[in-house]
Image (cartoon, helix red, strand yellow):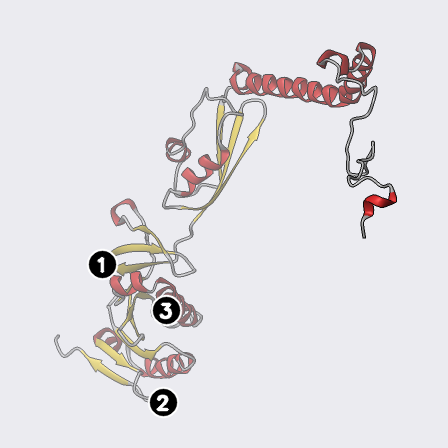
Amino acid sequence: MDRSRRGGSSERTVPAESRLTVRGKKNRKRPGSVWSRLPRPKTIVDACGRAVRRSLPALAATAGITVIGAGLWAGYRFVTTSERFAITSIEVHGETHLTDDQIRASLPVKLGDNVFATNLGKVAAATRALPWIASAEVHRVLPHTLVVEVREHAPVAIVELGELYLVDAAGHPFKRAQLEAGDGADLPVITGLERAVYEAAPGPTAATIVAALGALATWRAEPDRPEIGELHLDAHHALTLRTYEHATAIQLGQLGPELPARMRTFDAAWAELSEPERLRARAIHVDARIDQVTVALNTKD
């Protein structure tokens, strides 16, 4: 069909506006300058005021802490440097074997030092380092006195561990015995223990010493028994007592619950011996059987 005959044009007209056409808005404002976008001065002042008011408590607390800290530091400096608190006396209480001067000489403090600047822990540790000292406490008596309270070891025997040492009731050697200085006078001596064994197992060795001292206490409970000067322990912990005067060996056997019965057996045999026979007795064996005693006499005149 010839469309030209309909009076229409062969070319389609483009509409003035199309839905696919994007046009800018009319009368659109252009962006202003940076200064124009800043808040007003009054707004800034109000915001700063609010921030300051919120921070006032924290600032006051900080200032208070600073003042208090400065005061404490000034007080500390005063008490630790003032001559008013200089030590004029060091008192020692509880000493027996040591003298006051010996203990004072070991202390890391001297007269004239500040009583507050003195480290009490270090003073107590230096005191405990002395062999005789079992425990020590130190305190201040203001304004210028230092007091040292000590408790000394109480020796109950001498133990031979390569050298002679004083031993306490717990079985622990605490000091080398200086016999020439009077250490260990009238104390029994425990022999037969090896130093290497003690160093390898101090706890069990101390328990053995305590058991031997317990046997000695049981022995001494009977006043008619001879005085003992030495306790000998062999490798199997068999106990031999040696009398103080004539060194007669009384072999009781291993440490244990049978010892009191063996001691009673010794009592019966000892009562049957005459005084000359007791003097000649070299060894008395009660270690074979509880109800049997063998007495070895010295045949020499």
Q: Which residue is mark 3?
A: 208
Residue 194, how many percent across, how many down? 25, 65
Please report whichever mark, 2 or 1, sits nearer to the chain's N-terminal start.
1
Please report whichever mark, 3 or 2, sits nearer to the chain's N-terminal start.
3
What secondary structure is marked by label 1? Answer: loop
Is 77 in front, or is 52? Answer: 52
Residue lying at 82% horizontally and 35% vertically, measured from the top left: 15
- Compared to residue 205, the image places residue 88 above or below, namely above
- Compared to residue 172, the image places residue 70 above or below, namely above
Is residue 291 toward the left or the right of residue 34 in the image?
A: left
Q: Which residue is mark 1?
A: 162
Residue 7, how many percent across, how many down? 87, 41
Which disc number belongs to residue 291? 2
Residue farthest to the right, as pictured: 6
Q: 10 Å neighbourhood of mark 1: few (<14), some, or many (≥20)?
A: few
Question: What's under tag 3, amino acid-wise?
Answer: Thr
Which disc number belongs to residue 132? none
Question: What's under tag 1, amino acid-wise?
Answer: Gly
Q: CA distance from mark 2 to mark 1?
A: 36 Å
Q: Quadrant of the C terminus?
A: bottom left
